[in-house]
Image (tube, rainbow, N blue to C red):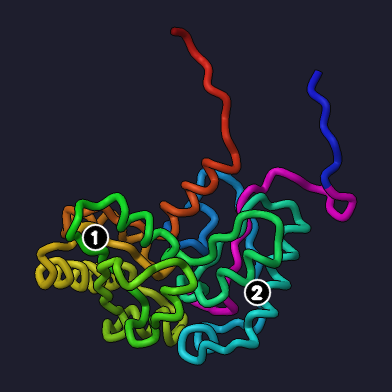
Amino acid sequence: MARYKVRSRTRSWDGVPIGILILDACYPCIPGNVGNATTYDFPVRYKEVSGASSEKLINQRDPSLLALFIDAAQELEREGVRAITGACGFMALFQRQVAQAVHIPVFISSLLQVPFVHRILPPGRSVGIITANKAQLTSEHFESVGITPDMPVVVYGMEDQDEFRTSILDEKGTLDSDLIEKEVCGVASRMKEENPNLGAVLLECSDLPPYAAAIQKVTDLPVFDFITMINHVHSAVCRTRYSGFM
């Protein structure tokens, strides 16, 4: 008979492998979005980082947010998750500090995948990053997740796309998914046309994975995002036994 041991006397549940730090924001999180639990084939536990707005994280890069992220991550760890991710690629600013503050894996920005993608592409190929706001994505974000100057990347932003900007960045309260799909596919198509050596696409924004298949269709390239990263880590922290016949 299998025997089990209490992991913590401070909670009365188990079995949630992935914890997700989510911003203090308000807009529809459709299926495929990091913030929609139906996106996953396994349980996830959300932790809203109260006071951490998109404005403070993306535009202000407010250093006071670090303490809020650490507190939220430590709370998720106490609640029994096996790894902690995020719901905004701009959380890259705090990747190192949050990882140092807990005892489980932390991967709070989809940008962490860029070094991996760079290494698996043929020499001379670039990684195309589609971000929520190109003007606000800095070398500081890149350095925090191990993106070095020798890694060729091209960055295109969604900040000038009307439906994306008003729905996600301005939080108008509604979202037209069909319009956003057209906008991001247009950005992806332009990226490929202007960069013949493009080898893969990386979606920084946690709101863009619902459109990953459409982006792949117009670019015919591998598309990486938060969901590819979360699924990857989940497969590592929750291994299953193999069975069958030889």
The residue tagged with tag 2: helix, strand or loop?
helix
> N-terminal of the two: label 1 or label 2?
2
Is residue 69 among the parts visible in the rendering?
A: yes
Q: What is the C-alpha distance between the residues marked 1 and 2?
A: 31 Å
Q: Residues within 10 Å of mark 1 (few under 14, many from 20)?
A: many
Q: Is residue 178 visible?
A: no
Question: Magenta span has 106?
Answer: no
Instruction: Say which residue label 1 marks.
Output: 215
Amino acid at dot 2 = Phe
In the image, which is nearer the foreground, mark 1 or mark 2? 2
Which secondary structure dominates the residues rendered in magenta?
Answer: loop
Q: Is residue 110 left or right of residue 241?
A: left
Q: Nearer the viewer, residue 209 or 2?
A: 2
The location of residue 184, given as percent across then percent down, is 26, 70
Q: Locate residue 6, reporting x and y percent.
A: 86, 41
State the residue lying farthest toward the top.
246
Is 46 situated above or below 169? Answer: above
Q: Quadrant of residue 123?
A: bottom left
Residue at image point 31% right, 61% down: 211
Q: Which region is colored magenta?
A: 8-28
Reading the image, the residue beneath label 2 is 69
Among all residues in the image, which is located at the extreme right? 9
